[in-house]
Amino acid sequence: MRGFLRPAAGLTCLFALAMTGCSADSDSASDAEPSEQSGASVSSASEAASSVTAYAPYVSADEASDNDSAGSPSVYNLAFVIADGSACTPSWNGTSAIGDSSVASRISALKEDGAQVRVSFGGASGKELAETCSTAAKLAAAYGKALDAAGSSLADFDIEGDALSDSDSVELRSEAIALLQEERSDLAVSFTLPVMPSGLDDGSVALLESANDKSVQVSTVNIMTMNYGESYDGDMGDYAITSAKAAQAQLRDVFGTSDSTAWRAMALTSMIGTNDVDGETFTLSDAAQVREFAEAKEVAWVSMWSTFRDQECESGNSNEDDPLTNCSGVSQSAGAFGEALAG
């Protein structure tokens, strides 16, 4: 997804929303998966619990939008924490200090009605902290500082572009997250990864395998159902569902878990309206289609990029009103995509 910098002790546990306990010592098996398969150990409580698909849009960490509250989100994904230049220092979008008072006020306002915030690290612009920190301990401390500033126990790692193909930073990040979860038993971790209708690419699968090898407890894998390429000029709702089905099979294999658990540990994020690729437009009808599918599969949450784009452009494609940065590029009422994806 776009960043804000441009004028843009055992096996991994994979389970829905990471809101219930998961232990490497658990003897629970999920559904009828064979016990010799390496992968997730899922608590029977989380397997049996009913799953409700939440709505958790991406929002700017430092700038409010009138559309933030459309659809009454239960969680806001705060975009993005990246490195401050080349230092192992977290910052909001590379422009605001992690303890910035205006950002703190912004976060407090988002929480006023009972919603949570999830800190999203990475994105498409700037340097993800794993690319600048020299040790896992320093990286874990940087992540922890951002989480503390937001008062959050939810961490999302949006890894794409060069960061996804950098095997050294992938391994360092896995080690750091594992350390952080040792310190913070309530920390729920999600990975946000690019996807195609054929599924996750090799780099994304390798990242998940790295997390698995380092005993990271992964609560959710959020796939970015967007920007497939110029040859994909069909229905974006259909592509999102096709991508989800392909990725779900991969999650089941990587983590060695059941069909139902893999669905409940998935999230879907669409780029509303005009996408970065010519010919790709995600419509309100597509949003309703994705929401219906997500509910049927009990997907953990659905999201969109982003609340500040959830409005109709007024003056066309200009620096002040760009459908790729601050409006959707389609005919809509303000907040309509939020309402559709919230269901």
Image: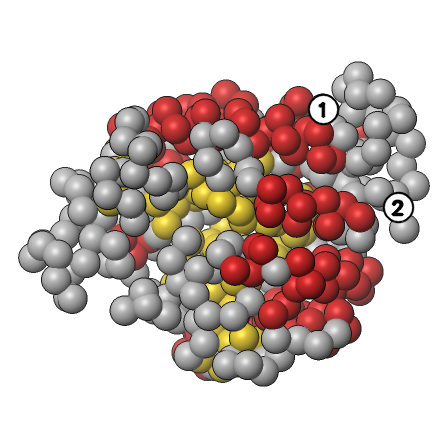
Q: Earlier in the sequence, mark 2 or mark 1?
A: 2
Q: Is residue 8 above or below residue 305?
A: below
Q: Is residue 144 visible?
A: yes
Q: Which residue is mark 2?
A: 10
Horizontal side of residue 98 vs 317, given as left or right: right
Instruction: Residue at 38% x, 39% y: name it.
Output: 228
Of all residues shown, which one is farthest toward the left? 315
Q: Position of residue 63 (x, y in %)?
A: 34, 69
Depth check: give the residue in front, 301 or 141: 141
Q: Is residue 321 above or below residue 127?
A: above
At mark 1, the secondary structure is: loop
Q: Which residue is mark 1?
A: 258
| Residue 252 figure quarter | top right
Q: Is residue 334 visible?
A: no
Q: Position of residue 238 (x, y in %)?
A: 37, 24
Q: Is residue 246 above or below residue 118?
A: above
Callout 2 crowding tier (Cα within 10 Å): few <14, some 14–19, many ≥20: some
At mark 2, the secondary structure is: loop
